[in-house]
Structures are given as C-alpha cells and as structure tokens.
C-alpha cells in the first residue's frame, strides 16, 4: 500500500496529462487488486472494476508512443507499446529528471555549507527531505529532516522539523519516533497555533493506538481540536479522528467517562457528526441497546479492516467492546436468563455461555452459571455480614493499638529503656 502510494505521488510530480492518466489507471488496478485480496465483501465489485481498468490500460497502451517524449521517441512514432513497456519508459524518464533535480540540490547545499549560512543550510536539508519524501525514499527523507535540527534558530523552525519527522515516521511505521518528536514539539518555548496542536494530538493518538494503549489513544483523539479540518489529510482525515476516538473510548472507558468525555464533549461531537454510524453505536451502547450497537459494529467492520492504521486492532477493539457490553448487561441483575440475554446479543446460548465462562474465569464478572436451567446468578456480597466483619476488624486493630500505648507508657514510667552506648 505504501509503495503504491509513493509510486503514484512520484508519477504526479512531473508527468503530463497523458502520463498521469495511464499512471492513475495502473495504480487503481494495483489498489483494487489489494482490496480484492483483503476484503471478501469487495471481491465481486473489485473484480468487475479490475476488468474495466485492464481494458482502459489496454486502450491507453495503443496510443502512439510519441506522447512519451524522449524515452520512446527512438522507437518511432508508429510503434505501439504494451502497458508494461510504456510504464517502464515513463518511469525511466522520471528517474532521469529526479537525478538532475538531486544534483541541483546537492550543488546548492554545498554552496550554503561553504558560505556557512545557517538558515540556508537548514532550508537545503529541508529541500532534500522534501525531494526524498516525494520520491518515496522515506529513510533518506527522515535523515535529512533530522539534520535540520542543528540549524534551527526559532521555535517555528523546531516545530516544522518535528512535524516533518513525525510525518515520515508515521509512513515508516516507527511510532517510537512519533512519540519522541511530539514531546519535543510540545516543549517548544513559544505557544503553538491551534492547527499544530491538533496535528500533534492526532500523531500522538496514532502512536498510542499502535502501542495498543487504547485509553491513552482515545484521550488524545478526544483532545483534538476541530481546527484540524483537512490540514492533516496526508496523515488522517477528520472522519478518522471520530472513528478512532469513538472505538477506542468504547473499548476502554467506563459509563461515566463515556458520558462526560465523549457524548457530552461538544468539541468531539463535531468529529462524530462526520461518521453517523459511530455516533449512533456510541449512543446505543450507553443506552444499553446492545443489539443495535453490535449491528452497527458489524456493518462497519469490512471498511475498518481496510483502514491503514486500524486494521490490525479491529479484533481486539471489538472483543473488548463486546466484553464491556456483556459486563454492563449483567451488573444490575441478581439473575439473568441466558436465552433472553443471547437474543439481546444476537448469538446462541452455547456461544454466550462460553463468553460468560471466560469473563468469570478472568474475574471480570462475579457470577455462576446454572448450565441445566440456563440461568446466570450474580454473586452479590452480603452487606450485613461485610459490615460486621469490618466492625470486628476495626475493634481488633483498636485493641492492639491501645495495648501498645499502655506498654510504652509503663516502660517510660519505670525508666525501663535501653540507652545506646556512647561512642568515643
């Protein structure tokens, strides 16, 4: 997915309209082939679309090769190339242009170093980072962005350097660097503007999500300001903030936190409005409409499995949300009929019984199951007995303390204490 993205970006930079049309067709073909592999629900639609794309590629390949310019002119105007040959020739022309651009940047940077102009050196490394980033060489882009740190003279420069490093680190999947540079940006002496703060919150949320710290990730996404808008579209969309924050909150927050920090959060509500399904499933979960909540989750799952950041966490998040729903369902009752509960969760009694057994084993539910009558009995503590036990324990502790105080008083009264030997 990353390779496809960078090949597309590389093609858009210097290609003319004809080149871009062919590149788009080829990259769409790659993208839909991946969708076909990873999402069963997209198989039929992706297969049909692939046939159309292949036909478009064949049609474009029959265009006379002269539109490609110098790489193919040597073959003559009448030569028709296959899509693969056409694409290779186009890619070679872009490689030559990239080399010329790189050589120019190197000459400029060497000049800046000779003149010892600190600001110009910083900009030179920045240009190199942008060059490598646009061509998909993320490792080299990371190194050049980091090198600008020694030439930063203002807080704005430091913040820009941190944002560049964060962007490349997210693409590389090195989320440890993301967390480190978010911290460095937040420690800048000057106050940050609202858009930059929102970007840092999103980046930190993604890092916590990757580390499977869902509660911390939820808090970061909930703190993201609406000023984010489309200003960080290369990393995350506003809809993604609502989706990531909502699902992580459902999996990790209790009812009170869910109400105060999510449902009543006016700022985060703006993000939830962009994803009505997530908003509705959160409201259904809080209102104990678990069947509707789980239906929304299942309808969202095929698309979420294609999400570049969330796909690896879907199963864990869904399991935690379902476990929380079961725990909340059983908490108010002394006994629950398993058939009624299974109907509420759209599952069979046997499957529900297995889930309850796992929760009881992990001490998440204090209950026992009557497998014969299919009833779950809660083990509520005997409040009367607990009160008496606490009173007796308090009495024993008081008696011990009083005896100790009397003993100490008598020892002091009779001067029965040991003095430490004096050291000479």
Image (spheres, helix red, strand yellow):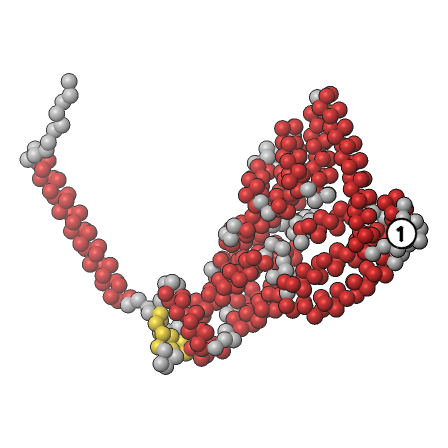
Residue positioned 88% across, 43% down in the render: 70
Q: Is residue 64 left or right of residue 112?
A: right
Q: Say whether residue 40 is visible.
A: yes
For the residue pair 169 and 180, the one nearer the viewer reads as 169
The residue shown at (49%, 66%) is 322
Q: Quadrant of the C terminus?
A: top left
Spot occupied by residue 310 in the image (x, y as percentages of width and height)? 59, 57
Horizontal arrangement in the rendering, residue 160 relative to residue 289 (left or right): right
Q: Nearer the viewer, residue 318 or 422?
A: 318
Mark 1 Cα-neighbour bin, 10 Å: few <14, some 14–19, many ≥20: many
Residue beneath the point at 88% across and 55% down: 80
> Left or right: where does residue 253 sit relative to residue 33?
left
Q: Position of residue 26 (x, y in %)?
A: 77, 56
Residue 277 in view? no
Classify the position of the N terminus by image quarter: bottom right
- As helix, strand or loop, the secondary structure at mark 1 comes to helix
Q: Position of residue 328 (x, y in %)?
A: 45, 67
Asked if 347 appears above or below 223 in the picture, the reply is below
- The image shows residue 253, relative to residue 293, as above or below, that is above
Direction bottom: furthest residue: 373
Please tell me which residue is depicted at 66% across the width and 34% down the height of the picture. Answer: 144
Name the spot of residue 268 as percent of width and height, x first: 60, 55
Mark 1 highlights which residue?
65
User: Total of numbered circles in the picture?
Assistant: 1
Residue closest to the far left: 414
Outermost residue to the top: 424
> Where on the picture, by quarter, is residue 154?
top right
Rendered image quadrant of residue 385: bottom left
- Front one among 126 and 233: 126
């Amino acid at each position: 997915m990353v390779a496809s993205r960078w090949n597309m970006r590389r093609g858009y930079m210097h290609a003319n309209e004809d080149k871009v049309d062919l590149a788009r067709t080829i990259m769409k073909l790659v993208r839909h082939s991946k969708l076909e592999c990873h999402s069963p629900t997209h198989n039929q639609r992706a297969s049909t679309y692939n046939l159309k794309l292949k036909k478009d590629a064949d049609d474009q390949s029959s265009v006379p090769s002269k539109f490609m310019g110098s790489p193919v002119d040597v073959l003559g105007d009448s030569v028709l190339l296959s899509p693969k040959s056409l694409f290779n020739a186009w890619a070679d022309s872009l490689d030559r242009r990239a080399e010329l651009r790189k050589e120019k940047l190197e000459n400029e940077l060497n000049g800046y170093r000779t003149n010892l102009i600190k600001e110009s050196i910083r900009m030179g490394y920045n240009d190199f980072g942008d060059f490598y980033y646009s061509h998909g060489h993320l490792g080299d882009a990371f190194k050049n962005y980091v090198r600008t740190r020694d030439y930063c003279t203002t807080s704005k420069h430091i913040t820009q350097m941190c944002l560049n490093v964060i962007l490349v680190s997210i693409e590389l999947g090195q989320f440890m660097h993301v967390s480190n540079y978010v911290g460095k940006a937040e420690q800048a002496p000057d106050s940050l503007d609202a858009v930059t703060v929102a970007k840092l919150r999103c980046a930190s949320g993604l890092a916590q999500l990757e580390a499977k710290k869902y509660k911390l990730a939820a808090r970061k996404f909930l703190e993201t300001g609406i000023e984010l808008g489309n200003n960080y579209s290369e990393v995350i969309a506003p809809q993604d903030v609502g989706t990531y924050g909502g699902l992580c909150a459902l999996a990790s927050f209790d009812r009170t936190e869910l109400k105060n920090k999510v449902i009543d959060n006016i700022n985060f509500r703006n993000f939830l409005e962009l994803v009505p399904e997530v908003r509705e499933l959160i409201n259904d979960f809080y209102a104990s409409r678990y069947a509707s909540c789980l239906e929304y989750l299942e309808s969202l799952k095929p698309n979420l499995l294609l999400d570049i950041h969330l796909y690896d966490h879907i199963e864990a998040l869904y399991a935690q949300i379902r476990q929380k729903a079961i725990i909340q369902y059983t908490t108010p009752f002394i006994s629950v009929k398993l058939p009624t509960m299974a109907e509420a969760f759209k599952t069979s009694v046997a499957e529900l019984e297995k889930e309850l057994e796992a929760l009881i084993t992990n001490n998440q539910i204090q209950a026992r199951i009557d497998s014969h009558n299919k009833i779950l009995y809660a083990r509520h503590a005997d409040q009367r007995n607990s009160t008496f036990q606490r009173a007796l324990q308090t009495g024993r502790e008081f008696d011990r303390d009083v005896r100790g105080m009397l003993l100490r008083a008598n020892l002091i009264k009779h001067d029965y204490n040991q003095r430490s030997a004096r050291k000479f």
